[in-house]
Image (tube, grey):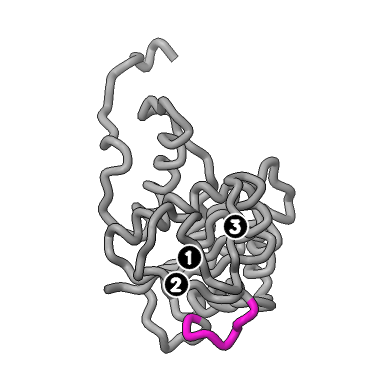
Amino acid sequence: MDNIIVGITGASGAIYARRLLQILCRKEYNVHLVISEAANIIIKQELGIDINLKQSNIVEFLGYTTDNIILYNNSDIGATIASGQYPVKAMVIVPCSMNTLCSIAHGISNNLIQRAASVTIKESRKLILVPRETPLSSIHLEAMLKLSSNGVCILPAMPGFYHHPKTIADQVDFIVSKIFDSMGIEHTLIPEWQYNKLLDIEDL
């Protein structure tokens, strides 16, 4: 099975990470998960789930048990995923805090998430960052441009509406579907877009 790294950092949007993990496990990928301490606080605030990072217990977060996820301590910069020799299909940081994004853009590797991202870039592998912050400052935008210029996929959590979402879960699936598209992984999270002629050019 292919290896995929998932980092969860201290930004709003923990529900995106949970949904991504649930589907990755069903697709039988080996998921290497790193949750920052700030992310754990946000998960508790948004989802009411307190993950015991020391005991590596994420059953409540996922909603079921799985053998496909390995949970790492974010301070363990000597973990296997911190090495470029370890084969990885892609890395996703979702949600990605601006602190994490700007740190990666400037080559800072103070923890495992940042280190693994730096390795992913230098090995020319797929790195997807999912920021949710709004509005964005010039500092944020410049960091995103720098990362994008180095092959990083900046995938903001900006849900669409053309698929007629009915629930929050529909909006979450929209973003997660974009992550899968970027990784080249097939999915059926949202219906394939169909063109409907609503306006003639003269009507615009």
Does residue 161 appear anywhere in the picture? Answer: yes
Mark pair 2, 1: CA separation? 6 Å
Q: What main secondary structure does the magenta stretch of the protein show?
A: loop
Mark pair 2, 3: CA separation? 16 Å
Residue 6 is marked as 1
Q: In the image, what residue occupies the spot 58% across and 52% down?
A: 49
From the top left corner, tell me how far across and down residue 35 is, in percent: 58, 65
Q: Give the amino acid type for the residue marked by disc 1 in the picture.
A: Val
Label 3 belongs to which residue? Answer: 96
Q: Give the amino acid type for the residue marked by disc 2 in the picture.
A: His
Does residue 89 appear anywhere in the picture? Answer: no
Out of 132 and 123, give the one closest to the viewer.
132
Badge 2 marks a residue whose secondary structure is: strand
The 10 Å Cα crowd at callout 1, few under 14, some 14 to 19, many 20 or more, is: many
Mark pair 3, 1: CA separation? 11 Å
Q: Give the amino acid type for the residue marked by disc 3 in the picture.
A: Cys
Out of 48 and 30, give the one closest to the viewer.
48
Label 2 belongs to which residue? Answer: 32
Badge 1 marks a residue whose secondary structure is: strand
Q: In the image, what residue occupies the spot 60% across and 66% down?
A: 52
Task: Locate residue 27: give its quadrant.
Answer: bottom left
Location of the N terminus (image quadrant) = bottom left
For the residues bearing labels 2 and 1, Cβ distance under 8 angstroms: yes
Q: What stretch of residues is rendered in magenta? A: 75-81
Question: In the rendered view, would you say 189 is above or below 67?
Answer: above
Badge 3 marks a residue whose secondary structure is: strand
